[in-house]
Amino acid sequence: MSASLSPARLRLRDVLRVGSAGLRTRPLRVFMSALGIAIGISAMIAVVGISSSSRADLDRQLAALGTNMLTVAPGSTMTGGDAKLPTESVAMISRIGPVEKVAATGKVSSAKVYRNDKIPSGESGGISVLAADLKLPSTVGTTMAHGIWFNKATEKYPAVVLGSSAAKRLGIAAAGVDVQVYLGSKWFTVVGILDPVPLAPELDGAVLVGWSAAQTYLGFDTHPTTVYTRTEDSAVEAVRSVLPGTTNPQAPSEVKVSRPSDALAAREATDQALTGLLLGLGGVSLLVGGVGVANTMVITVLERRGEIGLRRSLGATRGQIRLQFLAESLLLSALGGIGGVVVGIAVTTGYAAAQGYAAIVPPWATAGGVTSTLLIGGMAGLYPAIRASRLAPTEALAMP
């Protein structure tokens, strides 16, 4: 009986060894080819990283302009009178899914503030008194110039935080905290002074009292007069459309909601422009890398026809020859892709450090850079691999 012979199957380790053999024998050419791929990929990674870092810094600056902040205030009733927001407005607005932060202030019309009790009642200086929510600073994006903000304990006691302009008008800006002001026929201790609030300038000229203390000492009716709402950037318009009905279900027409900042439109336009730029540059970089791999592999097949003929004569199948050159193409692409990612990250880090903001390289960019390089390299090496496998042993050995 004659046993049929079948070619040995190449294991993964064998494929890698055979594929890398061609790279090891031509190190200079491999280096130059991988360098071409690396330059393309590093350019793509650097553009993505620099753009992402710049975009993050731009988003931070635009966020400071209040692109995602909406304000809710009472409008007018059907008869032309002044409407009021329900006392539960803040709680109801906080239940809206995309809403991230909510805080309110309430005007205390019956109270006036003076530097001391010797000043005539008609010389209050027009400084407004507002009951303030504990979450107000984080919602409107303000910080303390001096002292501290209210907490759950101090907001119940006769203590005040002054806006930056109010502190100057009262002559307290230089004195700092732990002084007293005369408010609603009672002495209140100044525990803090705010920095200027660009997003809510009405707070600069106000004296702020804890919500509970305003009820206890100043007869505050607990109806908010301004509700500050921070939302997800992508849901600003959607939240704005439901705020009137959520704030006052009984009379949504009596609720006024501010328009989103024009900076939000600027951010969206910037994002679209950067996305188009990244896609264009990335596509060109990958195309250049693919052409480089294809060129290298075609030349490699032409130069190694003798090796191909010898391997075919020794029993290598067409599939094994095809797999050898395809593996070589993928390894070459992987070297260039990984090198390009490393260089791209280094360039992004250096540029971001020079500009003074955090370096951000999206994970999808690094993973996509290597993956796309392998795909392009595989496609570019497929034709040379097929061409090599179709060479007949005698034809290949006869070629000079």
Image: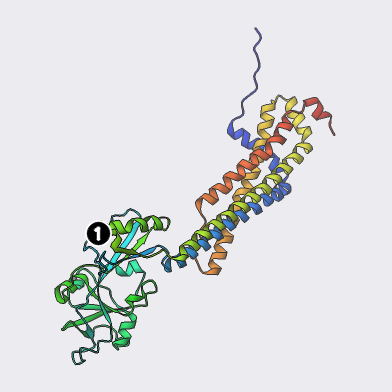
Residue 19, image x, y percentages: 66, 37
Residue 141, image x, y percentages: 36, 69
Residue 213, image x, y percentages: 18, 73
Residue at 64% over, 39% down: 378
Q: Is residue 345 shown left or right of residue 79? A: right
- Indicate the secondary structure of the residue bearing disc 1: helix
Q: Which of 7 and 149 is in front in this view?
A: 149
Q: Is residue 73 shown left or right of residue 41? A: left
Residue 364 visible in rendering = yes
Q: Which colour scheme is used?
A: rainbow
Q: Is residue 41 above or below residue 59?
A: above
Residue at 42% over, 68% down: 64
**Residue type of the residue flagged with mark 1:** Ala
Residue at 22% over, 62% down: 86
The residue that mark 1 highlights is 91
Q: In this view, does 112 lie above or below 306?
A: below
Residue at 25% over, 66% down: 79
* Quarter that holds the C terminus: top right
Q: In which quarter of the image is residue 125?
A: bottom left
* Quarter that holds the N terminus: top right
Q: Is residue 142 shown left or right of residue 342? A: left
Q: Is residue 243 above or below residue 364?
A: below
Q: Nearer the viewer, residue 291 or 183?
A: 183
Q: Nearer the viewer, residue 175 or 370?
A: 175
Q: In which quarter of the image is residue 373?
A: top right
